[in-house]
Amino acid sequence: MTQLIVELCQNHCGDRTLLSEMISAAAENGADIVKSQMIFSEDLTRRPEFDEGKAATDGTVLAIKRPYETEYERLKKLDLTEDDHRFFIEECKKYRILPMTTVFSRNRIPFTTSLPWPERIVKIASYDCASYPMVSELAASFDHLYISTGATFDEEIKKTAKLLKEKNKEFTFFHCVTSYPNTLEMCNLRRMQWLRQFTDSIGWSDHTLVARDGIRATKAAIALGADVIERHFTILESDKTKDGPVSITPKHLKELREFSALPQKDQLKIAQQEIPDWEMILGTETRDLTHTELLNRDYYRGRFGSKIDGNWIYNWDETITL
């Protein structure tokens, strides 16, 4: 069956009790892996162009507006401590579900690698798919890397695949659309087959809007042969957290677990019934990034960094060893 990863993101609200309840719900309803995020607000970088945003004279957005102080204060309230991350792993062991995390800045790699992971697996966000120093450093300590490829150019994906193959590492490439939320028309699920040329393990990280699209895109990806699915997950009402609108509930998770157990011909029949305009969600194997994806790439690639001797070091900086 398709491996199901639930992404807790910051839907835990920085609350250890809620974090534990989310892990329990994920395990009870069929997730294989529960994923945290190694985000620390102090790693947020200040970049003036995003404090006010930029636009051309015709109104075209050139840089999104995301003021540093507002974002820092938001993130600070959601921080997990290093001890919370240890607690996360212990709770996953308690509920017999595999833990994993996404690392967002290279200075957190030593701490991440020191933790007692039951299996040495790690996630790399799409904005760091082309951060080759970070990929190399994580590959040195983990056995299997799960890497999203949204907002990454084809040549960058090819280079990352080559790097990991040279290191004899197992890896999964996720197709995703880095527009939050994305529509069914934007899913372009044929892209998974393009990724299959690089690895036997491919998947779909789904950011569709649950209230509008339910779990139809996820079912379609499973029916099309996704080896792994990643979805944001919540046990709260969708309006209680920033990622709530694109997060599935325990009920959705259970439905996906049951769906993934069906024969593929039955999966395809159900998915096509739920999405009558089937070609709409398939798209093409290759495409240009949209303007929105390019704007998000510009902001999120440098959102977090490592402050060393008063200077910001980014995840792609080749000449720095942390």
Image (spheres, rainbow, N blue to C red):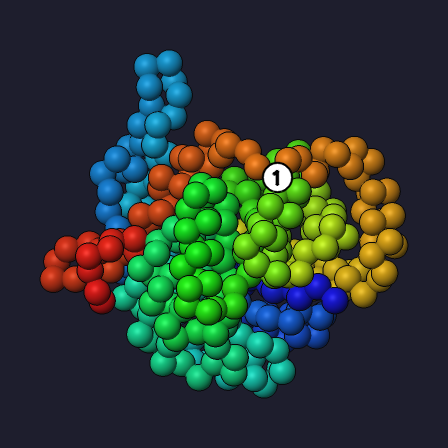
Say whether residue 241 is visible: no
Instruction: Report the amino acid beneath label 1.
Output: Glu
In the displayed structure image, the side of residue 260 where residue 244 appears, left or right? left
Give the residue drawn at x 66%, y 42%.
Answer: 190
Q: Is residue 165 above or below residue 111?
A: above
Q: Secondary structure at mark 1?
A: loop
Q: In which image quadrant can residue 312 be found? A: bottom left
Which residue lies most toward the top here?
A: 58
> For the N terminus, which image quadrant?
bottom right
> For the C terminus, which image quadrant?
bottom left
In the displayed structure image, the side of residue 112 where residue 322 appears, left or right? left
Give the residue drawn at x 37%, y 72%.
Answer: 140
Q: In the depicted view, which residue is nearer to us: 262 or 161?
A: 161
Q: Is residue 114 above or below residue 26?
A: below
Give the residue drawn at x 41%, y 46%.
Answer: 156
Q: In the depicted view, which residue is nearer to us: 85 or 244?
A: 85
Q: In which image quadrant can residue 211 be found? A: top right
Q: In the depicted view, which residue is nearer to us: 115 or 265?
A: 265
Residue bearing the label numbered 1: 285
Where is residue 199? Give x, y as percent.
57, 59
Q: Is residue 130 above or below residue 77?
A: above
In the displayed structure image, the side of residue 24 where residue 153 appears, left or right? left
Q: In which image quadrant can residue 162 be found? A: bottom left
Where is residue 67? Give x, y as percent.
30, 41
Give the residue drawn at x 21%, y 65%.
Answer: 321
Where is residue 6? Give x, y as percent.
60, 63
